[in-house]
Image: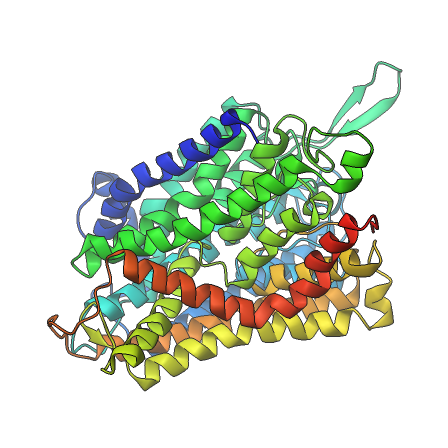
């Protein structure tokens, strides 16, 4: 661990905090339908979209109608991705002549991208055509990200409104998010990435002659446009198999740093949107503080573990830290920081192989995802996931003081607590249930690259990543088999939509309630006590749920390593 390393971490956190308030102000105006500096250009386009699609932007929806619209929207997205993957051999923009993807792989990938997971059981440059990458994947990256943000805004409206039956209009929210937030940023972002050396072309793959005289085919394509939204929208689906470790997806140290910033930017800004919409920005800063405490703790442990290396390395006289599986261009600190960011924010992009991290260094990304990726989280999903834990924390506080819990002027009653628990408990059912099957089913066991606790961690990580809609791979596990394609698809589907529906039910329930002014007995929710309570509830729930599984994987691997046994 070095001073320069910690400076990079502190600089990252400082820039995210600095961007939170102005971007939160802008996004609040967008979702309130207020004028922005882009309105003169984009407002006519927005109105034209509503006219063509028959949407009345002034007509809002009940939470159930909003949710059904969202689900039907994703059915269309699934059909588009599945269709172009199965038909890619006869579709244009296929310079490498890629054949049709298999049925189970197409099914897994379609579920993966509509759920904002972007789990990839394939190598992008060797499996998919340009058209599939653009029409199937990049377009869905925009729409799944916009959906997550729209759902978070709908839940915020539940907290901010009083005696109302509506939480907004799904079609309007998705349109405004895509048009005013995602597209403008991605246009500028894409140009920056091209300036750093990232390809953006429809030309064919390039043949090069090596110094030894051999021929090498270099894959290129419309990379920058996909990378921009995969990072900003916390999707993570890489154009290339090596993802953000590939020099064409991450050309320079500057591009690496900007990509890390873009993963967190919108998720952090949504906390400020929450504060502004409920009429008290301190509420948003309190939520961001909870996320910040958990994030900094995770970065510290991962950086320490990777910089310290292992006892086996020390025995061999290797004291420079654990560089296995890391891009030498970025080193230990940037790789550790990237790993924590991408698993805290449901992004799934990786610039190092987590399979090669130390046992404890690889455990933190696992924990980030198992907690529901509420540390910033996927755009939108992180905020509504965190608000579910806030509901539980407020309920606990109410039990301790013996009065009905309240949060931002709304009573938290049995319905909200039940919905929050349902959303939180459905996740470990997928993480742990499918892992239990995977480590005993012969075909699944044969896909594990390592034996012992490390092999267990590979399977646990795979189902955790998919259920949490993260999409990052531990590496070492052969996932492109029918078992993992089908079970993984079910985990991704449940992890996304079985959490959304209870969250939207809470939004509808809260919007219908009257606002209650704070009183002398109201628990303060903007100070350190509240932040500590929420952090404690998150860690207790996570510890009780996931510690046994972690003990079978990374914890026992760490203890065995200290005893001289490696896997």
Q: Position of 402 compared to 300: left or right?
A: left
Q: How is the image coloured?
A: rainbow
Residue occupying the point 79% across, 58% down: 455
Specify whether residue 52 is in view: no
Q: Residue 241 placed where, x, y %? A: 70, 42
- Number of dots carrying numbers: 0
Identified at 13% across, 75% down, the residue is 516
Q: Position of residue 18 (x, y in %)?
A: 30, 37
Q: Which one is nearer the viewer's eye here, 291 or 401?
A: 401
- The image shows residue 430 at horizontal and vertical percentages of 62, 72
Q: Is residue 449 left or right of residue 184?
A: right
Q: Position of residue 315 (x, y in %)?
A: 81, 35
Q: Image check: 435 left or right of 499?
A: right
Relative depth, front residue between 187 and 365: 365
Q: Is residue 304 above or below residue 494?
A: above
Name the quadrant containing residue 453.
Answer: bottom right
Is residue 96 or residue 556 the one in the foreground? Answer: 556
């Amino acid at each position: 661990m070095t001073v320069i390393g910690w400076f990079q971490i502190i600089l990252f956190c400082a820039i995210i905090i600095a961007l939170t308030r102005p971007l939160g102000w802008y996004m609040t105006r967008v979702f309130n339908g207020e004028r922005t500096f882009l309105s003169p250009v984009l407002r006519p386009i927005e109105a034209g979209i509503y006219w063509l699609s028959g949407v009345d932007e002034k007509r809002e929806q009940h939470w159930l109608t909003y949710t059904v619209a969202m689900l039907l929207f994703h059915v269309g997205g699934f059909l588009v991705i599945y269709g172009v993957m199965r038909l890619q051999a006869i579709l244009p923009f296929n310079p490498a002549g890629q054949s049709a993807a298999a049925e189970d792989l197409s099914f897994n990938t379609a579920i993966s991208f509509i759920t904002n997971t972007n789990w990839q059981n394939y190598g992008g440059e060797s499996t998919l055509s340009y058209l599939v990458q653009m029409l199937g994947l990049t377009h869905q990256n925009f729409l799944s990200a916009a959906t997550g943000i729209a759902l978070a805004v709908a839940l915020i409206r539940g907290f901010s409104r009083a005696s109302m039956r509506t939480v907004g209009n799904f079609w309007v929210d998705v349109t405004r998010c895509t048009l005013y937030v995602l597209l403008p940023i991605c246009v500028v972002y894409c140009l920056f990435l091209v300036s750093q050396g990232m390809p953006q072309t429809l030309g064919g793959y390039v043949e090069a002659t090596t110094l030894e005289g051999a021929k090498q085919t270099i894959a290129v394509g419309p990379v920058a446009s996909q990378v921009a939204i995969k990072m900003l929208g916390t999707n993570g689906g890489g154009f290339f198999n090596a993802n953000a470790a590939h020099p064409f997806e991450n050309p320079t140290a500057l591009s690496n740093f900007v990509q890390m910033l873009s993963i967190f930017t919108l998720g952090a800004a949504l906390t400020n949107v929450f504060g502004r919409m409920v009429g008290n920005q301190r509420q948003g800063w309190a939520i961001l503080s909870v996320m910040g405490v958990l994030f900094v703790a995770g970065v510290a442990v991962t950086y320490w573990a990777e910089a310290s290396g292992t006892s086996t390395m020390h025995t061999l006289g290797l004291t420079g830290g654990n560089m296995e599986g890391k891009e030498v261009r970025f080193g230990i600190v940037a790789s550790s920081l990237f790993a924590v960011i991408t698993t805290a924010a449901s992004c799934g992009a990786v610039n190092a192989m987590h399979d090669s991290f130390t046992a404890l260094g690889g455990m933190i990304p696992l924990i980030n995802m198992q907690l529901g990726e509420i540390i910033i989280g996927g755009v939108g999903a992180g905020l509504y996931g965190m608000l579910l834990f806030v509901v539980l924390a407020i309920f606990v506080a109410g039990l301790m003081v013996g009065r009905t819990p309240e949060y931002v002027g709304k009573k938290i009653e049995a319905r909200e607590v039940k919905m929050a628990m349902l959303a939180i408990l459905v996740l470990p059912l997928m993480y742990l249930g499918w892992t239990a099957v995977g480590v005993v089913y012969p075909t699944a066991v044969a896909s594990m690259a390592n034996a012992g606790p490390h092999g267990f961690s590979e399977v646990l990580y795979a189902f955790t990543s998919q259920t949490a809609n993260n999409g990052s791979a531990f590496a070492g596990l052969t996932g492109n088999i029918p078992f993992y394609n089908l079970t993984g698809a079910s985990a991704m589907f449940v992890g996304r939509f079985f959490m959304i529906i209870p969250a939207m039910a809470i939004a509808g329930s809260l919007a219908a309630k009257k606002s209650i002014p704070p009183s002398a007995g109201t628990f303060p929710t903007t100070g350190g006590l509240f932040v500590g309570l929420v952090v404690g509830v998150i860690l207790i729930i996570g510890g009780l749920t996931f510690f046994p599984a972690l003990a079978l994987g990374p914890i026992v691997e760490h203890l065995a390593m200290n005893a001289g046994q490696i896997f």
